């Protein structure tokens, strides 16, 4: 698909989404991806899927596997892939209902959907159009589009009082459905992805970032979070993949933004290429804590760093 003709984007706003970093990321993709030697692409922490979408639009990949531990997120990807007509229909119904309501009714509308969404669960094996619809509606109407759960695993973000939201972006959803047809989606732990690699594989890992500070970090994609111990385990996983002679790229926060003496990732990944890309800190209640920062992009191959800052 020609990206110049159809600019496809993620269907949800996601904490840590990579849409704004793609132009920099392209310079760090392995050469083998650009020359067509890479035939398998794997993303063990899918999230909003910006990198997956970019690669699907720009490179000819035969085998694509995407994983995320968030069952409801993966359910949305599956529904977009296999039941796009029904999903679009349900989203339009919700959108039309919302736009006809007054401010107080809109808030109640959001709270009712959130209550219903939290009242039941689906399994990793299920595909639910109803739950995908609720997930997308909540994402479009909640504060900052932030998927956040409490310790019980319940979605608990608040209403954003959007005046004219596009709950159903039909054109984008249908384009996503087209490029997802050859993607296999799995709601499972990232370690399961190792089953699908071959010698022509490129893996991009985008785990929940290590918090820069206790107040600005965000790891609650799931109720259990992602600790320093989890980061260490992920590094061991990265090293095990490296032994398989495949191409690896991993994103994470740069601790030196707030503490120049913090060598956490330098020590963990000291035998690999630790690159920096320019980003912006967005998720913080305090405005002064937002702004330009750097993020780490760790590869097991040398990338092209000649990009404009």
Image (cartoon, rainbow, N blue to C red):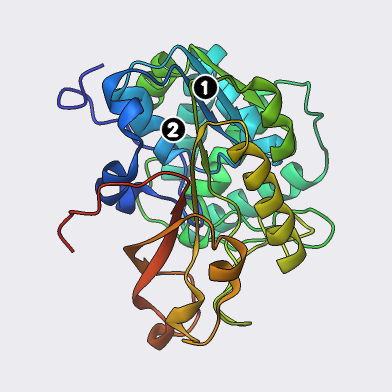
Residue 187 in the image: state x and y as whole percent: 71, 31
Q: Residues within 10 Å of mark 1 (few under 14, many from 20)?
A: many
Residue beneath disc 2 = 52
Pick the quarter of the image with the C terminus: bottom left
Residue 241 in the image: state x and y as whole percent: 63, 37
Residue 121 versus residue 213: which sits nearer the camera? Answer: 213
Give the residue displayed 48% in from the left and 13% down from the top: 85
Vertical side of 16 occupied by 204: above or below: above
Decide if residue 165 is on the left or right side of residue 123.
left
Vertical side of 186 occupied by 249: above or below: below
Decide if residue 196 is on the left or right side of residue 116.
left
Look at the image and tell me whether residue 169 can be seen: no
Dot 1 lies on which element? Answer: helix
| Label number found at residue 80 | 1
CA distance for labels 1 and 2: 15 Å
Which is more foreground, mark 1 or mark 2?
Answer: 2
Dot 2 lies on which element? Answer: helix
Residue 229 in the image: state x and y as whole percent: 76, 64
> In terms of image quadrants, where is residue 28?
top left
Decide if residue 45 is on the left or right side of residue 92.
right
Look at the image and tell me whether residue 60 can be seen: yes
Residue 224 in the image: state x and y as whole percent: 79, 59
Q: Are marks 1 and 2 in contact (CB under 8 Å)?
A: no
Q: Residues within 10 Å of mark 2 (few under 14, many from 20)?
A: many
Report the number of discs: 2
Give the residue displayed 74% in from the left and 49% down from the top: 115
């Amino acid at each position: 698909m020609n990206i110049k003709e159809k600019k496809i984007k993620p269907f949800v706003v996601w904490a840590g989404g990579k849409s704004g970093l793609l132009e920099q990321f392209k310079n760090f993709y392995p050469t083998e991806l650009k020359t067509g030697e890479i035939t398998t692409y794997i993303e063990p922490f899918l999230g909003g899927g910006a990198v997956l979408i970019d690669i699907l639009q720009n490179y000819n990949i035969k085998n694509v596997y995407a994983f995320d531990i968030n069952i409801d997120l993966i359910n949305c990807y599956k529904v977009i892939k296999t039941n796009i007509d029904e999903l679009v229909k349900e989203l339009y119904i919700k959108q039309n209902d919302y736009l006809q309501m007054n401010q107080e009714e809109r808030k109640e509308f959001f709270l009712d959907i959130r209550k219903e969404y939290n009242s039941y669960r689906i399994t990793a094996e299920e595909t639910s159009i109803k739950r995908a619809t609720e997930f997308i509606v909540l994402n479009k109407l909640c504060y900052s589009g932030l998927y956040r759960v409490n310790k019980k695993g319940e979605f608990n973000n608040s209403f954003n009082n959007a005046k004219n939201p596009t709950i159903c972006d039909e054109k984008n959803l249908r384009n996503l459905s087209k490029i997802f047809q050859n993607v296999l989606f799995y709601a499972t732990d990232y370690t399961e992805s190792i089953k699908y690699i071959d010698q022509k594989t490129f893996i991009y890992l985008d785990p929940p970032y290590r918090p820069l500070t206790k107040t600005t970090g965000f790891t609650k994609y799931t109720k259990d979070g992602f600790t320093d111990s989890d980061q260490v385990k992920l590094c061991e996983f990265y090293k095990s993949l490296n032994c398989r002679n495949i191409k690896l790229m991993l994103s994470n926060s740069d601790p030196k933004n707030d503490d120049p003496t913090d060598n956490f990732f330098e020590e963990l990944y000291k035998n690999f290429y630790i690159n920096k890309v320019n980003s912006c800190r967005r998720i913080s209640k305090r405005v002064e804590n937002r702004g330009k920062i750097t993020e780490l992009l760790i590869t097991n191959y040398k990338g092209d760093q000649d990009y404009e800052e």
